[in-house]
Amino acid sequence: MIDPDASAGQTAISYTDEFLDAALKKIDKMFGKGFAKDNPALVQGYIHACALNLGAFMQASVALQANGELDGLLDQLEDFDKR
């Protein structure tokens, strides 16, 4: 979980740690135990995709917040997470 009181650097590290944990779990689940460890480029690609998605989300949230539309996006994300 990301700490809302953390510094920007601490937050970046927390997101990266979450991305790494997710990559290892997801890749090993899909391809078998130890596959992620044996394929670091795949782990790197997964983390890179997560970072790009987070960056795009952050940019969109700034634009939506400026237009007063951020709450709608957050509601949609919560609904997506419940699937």
Image (cartoon, rainbow, N blue to C red):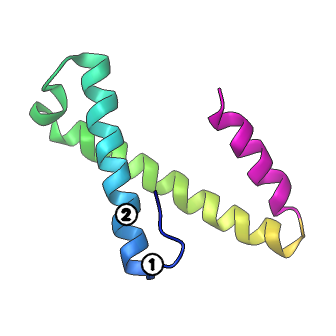
- The disc placed on residue 68 is none
Q: Which residues are magenta?
A: 69-83
Number of residues whose C-alpha sits closer than 10 Å to that of mark 1, classed few (under 14), some (14–19) or many (20 or more): few
Say whether residue 59 is left or right of residue 26. Answer: right
Say whether residue 1 is left or right of residue 36. Answer: right
Which residue lies at the image location 34% right of the left edge and 29% below the top edge?
26
Callout 1 amino acid:
Ala
Which of 35 and 45 lies nearest the eye of the viewer?
A: 35
Q: Secondary structure at mark 1?
A: loop
Residue 81 location, quadrant = top right
Callout 2 amino acid:
Ser
In the rendered image, the vertical position of residue 3 relative to residue 18, given as above or below: below
Number of residues whose C-alpha sits closer than 10 Å to that of mark 2, classed few (under 14), some (14–19) or many (20 or more): some
Q: Position of residue 46 (x, y in %)?
A: 35, 42
Which residue lies most toward the right here?
Answer: 68
User: What residue sits right under mark 1 in the picture?
Assistant: 6
Which residue lies at the image location 51% right of the left edge and 79% below the top edge?
5
In the rendered image, the vertical position of residue 46 relative to residue 56, given as above or below: above
Which residue lies at the image location 26% right of the left edge and 47% below the top edge?
44
Which residue lies most toward the bottom here?
Answer: 7
**Type of secondary structure dominating the magenta stretch:** helix
Please tell me which of labels 2 and 1 falls first in the chain.
1
Q: Secondary structure at mark 2?
A: helix
Which of 79 and 3 lies nearest the eye of the viewer?
A: 3
User: What residue sits right under mark 2 in the picture?
Assistant: 14
Whether the residues at callouts 2 and 1 have beta carbons within 8 Å, the answer is yes
Q: Position of residue 69 (x, y in %)?
A: 87, 62
